[in-house]
């Protein structure tokens, strides 16, 4: 170890020592926990009742989208996936825009990161996030039939595809939905009066809308006008038929036909279904027609959002700390959510899971029950040669957890706490766990494989990490940065550190960044000034000249199991029954070095020896004086 490393180790060690264990304000934290562990404190999704997305969970999924008279667009997402977070504003906008369509099709979403929804996300074979599926009216789940995918995240494209699917529904599935528009094209034989045949007395107008080939303009217009019983929209594509109703593609693509056969053409401001609908609405309003109120969607009760202020303060105070709580949360999410969600674990996936569990077993940060759990789970998984299902894994994991309970010392993030539930959390804890594992491997003399952890991580991210976009980026970065050429275990620690910094750099300022925790080039100057060679280097500067020896020491220090902070741990006994004693012992040994201790022992032994000698001398003297004393006494 170089002298720089020694100095850095000592300074950082002392800093961490002083704060990681010193008087965790437990009462304050308990108060926060109480606030957080209220029954409503479950996994929060990306949508709430302030927006128009219908919130689905396992408890309302079937009743909201299965065998209904309306269709449903369902987004399967992971609340911790940056791509899903980026897409959420678009989806909210879509839901807001398509609210008038809700009697025919609703816009809904389910969070696959919530453990309770594992079964649904597994059944629907969700392989990437976000996934959009259209479920028809009357939909019944069946093997190979879990909705039709919509492979775009562009708002206009989604709306168009959805309109196309709605219009293509066959009539039998929608017979009991009276709001369903007539999407049939006007034919050559139709006339102004025949357009009203078969209609109830409510519609006073039929809107004839020209729809160019490969467009859904008229379908969308009809859907935007669902709340207006005074009008029925009909599609026309043939320009000659359109002309019969004064419709001219390009100039007057919309006309209104009344019951007396009067026809008036209109020229909407824009070529969109929404704009066509607005033009028609204006006419209807002038004539004092009113819309029906929009049907309220059934929204699953959302959890109250608590701001864990005390946790945020703690993390701001100790920016580079690694917390036991986050390591546990990462493992829990992997075991409870990410692996069980996979329908079939076979081939490369199975190998990746086995490798990951072997590494986790070796460097497991959990307490003794947690270590047993991972060991038994690994033994279970390695028995399978060809395939196992996510459900089998989940059952075995839950059985073992029941047997070994309690396994986890906490159920909340600490270092990965965010200012809002849409930030940080699991992906932050996953980085933390993998950094921890690379450091433990580097400190382990027994293993010589430099790629042990990186390979396990690569396989896990590729096959199980629910942030699809992140996984793709990571694989590209891994080959660009030549992950398979990493020469030794210490370089593996640095490889992951540098790769993570590259991701930080790319995401700095992104809308997935928590404003309370901006992405920096890690470690910051204030956390480790020795880590940067040039004092003027800033966190914004990608070309920071790093002192890699110092960085390595710093990373080894903060991931040293002795320095992992237990702030926020609810069940300390789950980790080490004698944690307090060990801490006291460590506090003593942090004040005295080994040499001090040995000198102390020597001094102690020397004192005892001196006392024995003194006693012997005294006793011998007393023995010699005794006859004299006796004489004296005898004389007296
Ligand atoms: C493998 C992987 C790939 C990802 N790719 C993407 C992506 O392509 N797009 C996307 O939007 N999101 C991606 N994410 C998520 C993203 O990187 C963050 O995890 C997320 O935005 C939360 O950020 P955060 O601020 O909590 O800190 P994170 O970046 O998650 O960091 C967690 C903690 O690690 C420590 N840390 C930070 N940098 C380093 C470092 N260089 N070395 C050691 N420790 C460090 C800090 O204490 C920090 O609090 C990815 C996550 C993972 C695990």
Image (cartoon, rainbow, N blue to C red):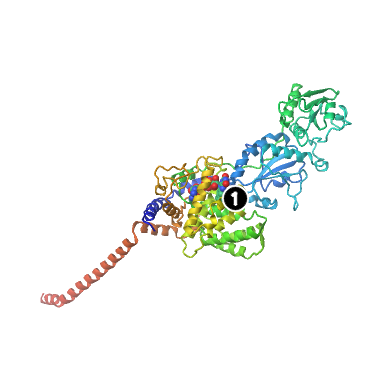
**Where does residue 116 sit, x and y in percent of width and height?**
64, 50
Callout 1 crowding tier (Cα within 10 Å): few <14, some 14–19, many ≥20:
some
Q: Nearer the viewer, residue 484 or 522?
A: 484
The image shows residue 496 at horizontal and vertical percentages of 51, 53
Name the quadrant of the N terminus: bottom left
Residue 538 vertical placement versus 445 (above, below): above
> Can you tell which quarter of the image residue 588 is in?
bottom left
Taking 578 as reference, is 478 left or right? right
- Quarter of the image that includes the C terminus: bottom left
Q: Residue furthest left?
A: 635
For ligand 1, tell me if the residue under mark 1 lies within 8 Å: yes
Q: Can residue 426 be seen by looking at this rendering?
A: no
Task: Between residue 516 and residue 229, name the one nearer to us.
Answer: 516
The answer to whether one can see residue 285 in this image is yes
- Residue pictured at 34% horizontal, 56% vertical: 591
Rendered image quadrant of residue 374 = bottom right
- Asked whether, in this view, residue 109 is left or right of residue 522, the answer is right
Task: From the image, tell me which residue sits under label 1.
Answer: 471
State the image quarter where residue 285 is shown: top right
Q: Position of residue 534 (x, y in %)?
A: 40, 45
Residue ranking furthest to the right: 189
**Front residue (pair 1, 11):** 1
Which element is circle 1 on?
A: helix
Q: How many marks?
A: 1
> Is 315 on the left-hand or right-hand side of 423?
left
Could you tell me which residue is drawn at 84 percent across and 22 percent down? 262
Residue at image position (58%, 41%) is: 304
Q: Whole-percent x and y of residue 424?
A: 54, 45
Looking at the image, residue 205 sits to the left or right of residue 567; the answer is: right
């Amino acid at each position: 170890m170089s002298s720089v490393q020694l100095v850095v180790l000592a300074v950082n060690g002392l800093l961490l020592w002083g704060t990681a264990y010193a008087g965790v304000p437990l009462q304050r934290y308990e108060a926060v926990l109480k606030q957080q562990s209220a029954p409503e404190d479950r996994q929060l999704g990306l949508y709430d009742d302030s927006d128009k997305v219908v919130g689905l969970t396992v408890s309302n999924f079937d009743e909201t989208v299965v065998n209904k008279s309306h269709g449903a667009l369902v987004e399967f997402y992971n609340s911790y996936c940056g791509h899903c977070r980026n897409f959420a504003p678009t989806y909210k906008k879509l839901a807001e825009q398509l609210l008038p369509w809700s009697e025919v099709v609703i816009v809904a979403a389910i969070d696959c990161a919530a453990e309770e929804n594992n079964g649904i996300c597994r059944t629907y074979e969700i392989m990437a996030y976000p996934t959009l599926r259209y479920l028809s009216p009357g939909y019944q789940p069946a093997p190979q039939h879990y909705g039709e995918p919509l492979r775009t995240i562009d708002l206009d494209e989604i709306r168009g595809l959805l309109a196309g699917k709605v219009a293509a529904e066959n009539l039998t599935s929608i017979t009991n939905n009276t709001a369903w528009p007539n999407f049939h094209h006007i034919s050559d034989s139709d006339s102004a009066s025949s357009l009203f045949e078969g209609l109830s007395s409510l519609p006073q107008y039929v809107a004839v809308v020209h729809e160019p080939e490969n467009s859904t303009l008229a379908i969308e217009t009809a859907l935007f006008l669902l709340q207006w019983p005074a009008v029925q929209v009909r599609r026309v594509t043939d320009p000659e038929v359109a002309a019969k109703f004064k419709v001219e593609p390009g100039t007057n693509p919309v006309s209104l036909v009344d019951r007396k056969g009067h026809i008036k053409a209109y020229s909407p401001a824009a070529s969109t279904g929404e704009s066509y609908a607005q033009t028609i609405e204006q006419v209807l309003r002038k004539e004092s027609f009113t819309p029906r109120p929009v049907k309220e969607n059934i929204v699953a009760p959302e959890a109250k959002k608590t701001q864990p202020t005390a946790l945020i303060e703690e993390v701001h105070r100790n920016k580079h700390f690694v917390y036991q709580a986050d390591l546990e949360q990462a493992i829990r999410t992997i075991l409870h959510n990410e692996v069980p969600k996979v329908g079939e674990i076979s081939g490369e996936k199975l190998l990746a899971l086995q490798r990951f569990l072997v590494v986790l077993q070796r460097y497991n940060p959990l307490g003794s029950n947690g270590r047993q759990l991972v060991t038994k789970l690994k033994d279970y998984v390695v028995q399978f040669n060809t395939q196992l299902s996510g459900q089998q894994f989940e059952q075995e994991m839950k059985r073992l957890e029941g047997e070994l309970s309690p396994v986890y010392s906490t159920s909340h993030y600490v270092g990965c706490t965010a200012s809002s539930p849409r930030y940080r959390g699991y992906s932050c804890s996953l980085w933390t766990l993998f950094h921890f594992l690379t450091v433990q491997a580097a400190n382990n003399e027994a293993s010589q494989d430099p790629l042990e952890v990186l390979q396990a991580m690569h396989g896990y991210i590729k096959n199980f990490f629910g942030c699809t976009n992140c996984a793709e980026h990571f694989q590209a970065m891994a080959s660009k940065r030549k992950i398979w050429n990493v020469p030794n275990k210490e370089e593996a620690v640095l490889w992951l550190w540098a790769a993570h910094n590259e991701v930080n750099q790319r995401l700095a300022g992104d809308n997935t960044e928590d404003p309370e925790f901006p992405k920096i080039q890690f470690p910051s100057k204030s956390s480790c000034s020795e880590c940067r060679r040039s004092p003027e280097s800033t966190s914004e500067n990608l070309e920071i000249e790093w002192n890699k020896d110092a960085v390595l020491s710093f990373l080894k220090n903060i991931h040293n199991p002795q320095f992992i902070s237990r702030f926020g741990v609810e069940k300390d006994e789950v980790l080490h029954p004698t944690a307090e004693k060990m801490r006291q012992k460590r506090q003593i040994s942090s004040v005295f070095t080994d040499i001090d201790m040995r000198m102390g022992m020597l001094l102690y032994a020397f004192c005892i020896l001196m006392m024995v000698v003194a006693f012997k001398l005294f006793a011998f003297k007393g023995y010699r004086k005794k006859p004299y004393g006796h004489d004296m006494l005898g004389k007296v």
